Image (tube, helix red, strand yellow):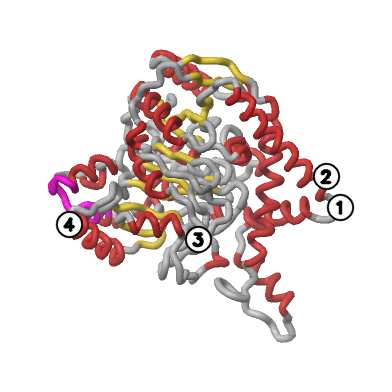
Amino acid sequence: MADLNKLTIAAARDALRKGDVSSAELTEACLGEIESAGALNAFVHNTPEIARAQAAAADARIKAGDAPDMCGIPLGIKDLFCTKGVPSQAASNILKGFKPEYESTVTSQLFDAGAVMLGKLNMDEFAMGSSNETSAYGNAVNPWRRDGSEAALTPGGSSGGSASAVAADLCLAATGTDTGGSIRQPAAFTGITGIKPTYGRVSRWGVVAFASSLDQAGPMTKDVRDAAIMLEAMCGHDAKDSTSADLAVPNFEAMLTGDIRGKTIGIPREYRMDGMPEEIEKLWAEGTEMLKAAGAKIVDISLPHTKYALPTYYVIAPAEASSNLARYDGVRYGHRAKLAAGDGITEMYEKTRAEGFGHEVQRRVMVGTYVLSAGFYDAYYNRARKVRTLIKRDFEEVFATGVDAILTPATPSAAFGLGEMSEADPIAMYLNDVFTVTVNLAGLPGIAVPTGTDSQGLPLGLQLIGRPWEEGDLLNTAYALEQAAGFVAKPAKWW
């Protein structure tokens, strides 16, 4: 079989079962692609020895007839997931050289299912960013280019390396994390599928924390069926994570019928932003018509507190980050600054954190520390928590009326050029999360599905937001949208 690296998880699984291909062959095909794709800067720690050993074990398992769906599938792992004995530095210089002595629950579950780790993937430092330009490894690059242009584009963030690697067929799928849209926005920018499950559906244990009440891991895949297959392997109760839900994990793939007749899809009026590009409006309208044609009932809904979502998010997330990142001080692991004679522990903390953290992380830590300080806690942090409750209630009230899913744009634009936002106010960059942050604040599942291209040939995605814990139903609605949109475009290879 040619172009093994271009297979979907489902196609590879079936070929492995039939004996048409081996995991070793799949793995070598991906390793070869990674080797020639340095220009994308997607993989930052390659693990070919681990991959080959895992592939050999997977082939033996398949031969013995003991093979879960993910067995033998080559994956990329975002650098935020701790992987035993492999650098796991969250794209930050402060964790340079850190090799955990333990495995995150998500990677442990994937490896137990027989998945193969090709290496660790680029990302924004500590998952803080929307463009993968804050990484200690340098920018990840989108495999897509504008028609007739050589300009390098962002793959989105923070899971930019994951999105780039999947879109460029360097791996069959990848893990991502989503704190305010970091799976869904890069998925939309690169023409792939990304799902953020309900908060608590996937264990956060062993995933480097950004904002603990918002972070959630999920799969980034080539299509909706693959997202269903991989999500099932990632889900499950974990006693090591106090926020992990003790709920049965359904067979998500079996729920993909494509039949959404009788389903009610809500269109929120508050997501029609001033200055939204015409192409995004058109895509949204077309997506609405596709779901209507598939038998869904379309209703207008109101989520009145949406306008407060971004400021709420950018109070709560930095507050939690400033608390979580206090542990990186040069004492136990990672980078430690060189000290001058007479320097004490305070100087060590200050110099280590000044050297180790990038500017965006420093900015968010300072904002977070400010909003948590004694004089401002009630004015900012407590008020943001109250507004978050109102945002969550908006969704609860809409779902209580019988709405099954909500359709919105995934991003306010197609992928922008690397460096194009460097001189902009940071708030301009934060606006990339305008359609996605509400989902994290409310703890809901959300999925980005590629549904079209803009006038310059770049992919555009739509987002579906589902009821809590009903990922199967959400995936089925996404599957119906995917089937109707028929998006098959791939980036032209230039790297």
Q: Residue 326 in the image: state x and y as whole percent.
A: 67, 64
Whether residue 349 sits left or right of residue 181 in the image: it is: right
For the residues labelled 1 and 4, the Cα–Cα distance comes to 64 Å
Residue located beneath label 4 in the image: 64
Whether residue 72 sits left or right of residue 429 in the image: it is: left
Task: Using the image, determine if residue 477 lies above or below residue 23.
Answer: above
The residue mark sitting in front, 3 or 1, is 3
Q: Categorize mark 3 by other alpha carbons within 10 Å: few (<14), some (14-19), many (20+).
A: many
Q: Residue at x 58, y 26 (%)?
A: 399
Residue located beneath label 2 in the image: 379
In the image, 392 versus 304, the foreground residue is: 392
For the residues labelled 2 and 4, the Cα–Cα distance comes to 62 Å
- Three-letter code, disc 4: Ala
Residue located beneath label 3 in the image: 206
- Three-letter code, disc 1: Gly
Q: Is residue 86 visible?
A: yes
Q: Categorize mark 4 by other alpha carbons within 10 Å: few (<14), some (14-19), many (20+).
A: few
